Image: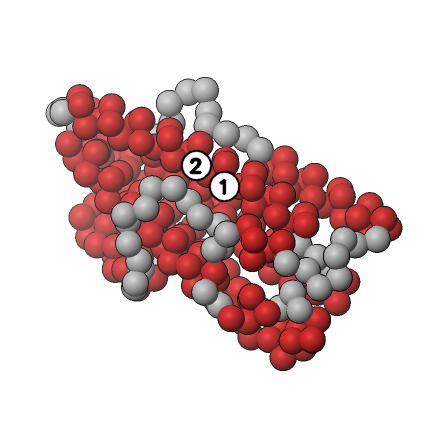
Amino acid sequence: MADIKNKSVEEQEQDINLQIANLQIGTSNSQKQMEIFSNNEELERSPNGSRNTESNEAGSSKKNEQESDYDSGSDSDMDDPLLVIEKILLKYNDFIEYVYQILKKYEEKQDWSEIVEIVQKLVKTLNQHMIVVDFYMKCLEELGCFEKQYQFRETHTLNILDVIRHINTRIASSSSFRLVSDIKNRGKVLPICLGEFERSRRELSLMIDSMQLLKKLGLELDRDDETR
């Protein structure tokens, strides 16, 4: 991240926009709902059926931990869209990290059943967060006196969602990821698949860093407006 101490809000925002644009190639903001990978059917395929009882019990504590992470929906209070988008980004990052760790230990893995359940909960949670974002943005737009805050949040929430969709689409269209559940192909495609997930992890890490600066700039805009 470039040195921001002596930069204006506008210059800092331009730096973030450039960084995000480099991750955004081929994206579209026409979709509002999140899609995790292509669909759950891709994850449900398994060459060996259900795992044995011992494997299920061994994985149950980790699955429950992941489910609790994704089970919280929208907050009771109206949240700043930047904070809600940060929640979405962090939850998606946690999920990518979870799948990546499973892939690294794939010799012990026989099916995707627990991932399917987590995907379903994650999709539900992220869509609930998006309802909060939409509601807050409509309130800002209708008030009319917060044009700068509205434009700032609209631009950056869409940009961050586009990056997440771009990463998600790339994973969904990956032939190595589709083939890795087949034990016959696993040895050939697993290194490629791990490399793809490592790239996604790096990109999400950059976005999380950018998110911290975006929150800071959003607060500065809010304070500037309050002092007028």
In the rendered image, the residue lying farthest to the right is 54
Can residue 4 be seen from the camera position used here? no
In this picture the colour scheme is: secondary structure
Looking at this view, is 98 or 181 the one in front? 181
Q: Residue at x 75, y 67 (%)?
A: 107
Residue 171: assigned label: none
- Residue 74, image x, y percentages: 46, 28
Q: Is residue 99 above or below residue 175?
A: above
Q: Dot 2 lies on which element? A: helix
Looking at this view, is 172 or 96 the one in front? 172
Q: Residue at x 63, y 39 (%)?
A: 67
Residue 61 relative to residue 160: left or right: right
Residue marked by disc 1: 123
Quadrant where the C terminus is found in the figure = top left
Residue marked by disc 2: 127
Number of marks in the rendered image: 2
Tell me the quarter of the picture where residue 26 sits: bottom left
Tell me the quarter of the picture where residue 153 sits: top left
- Residue 125, image x, y percentages: 50, 35
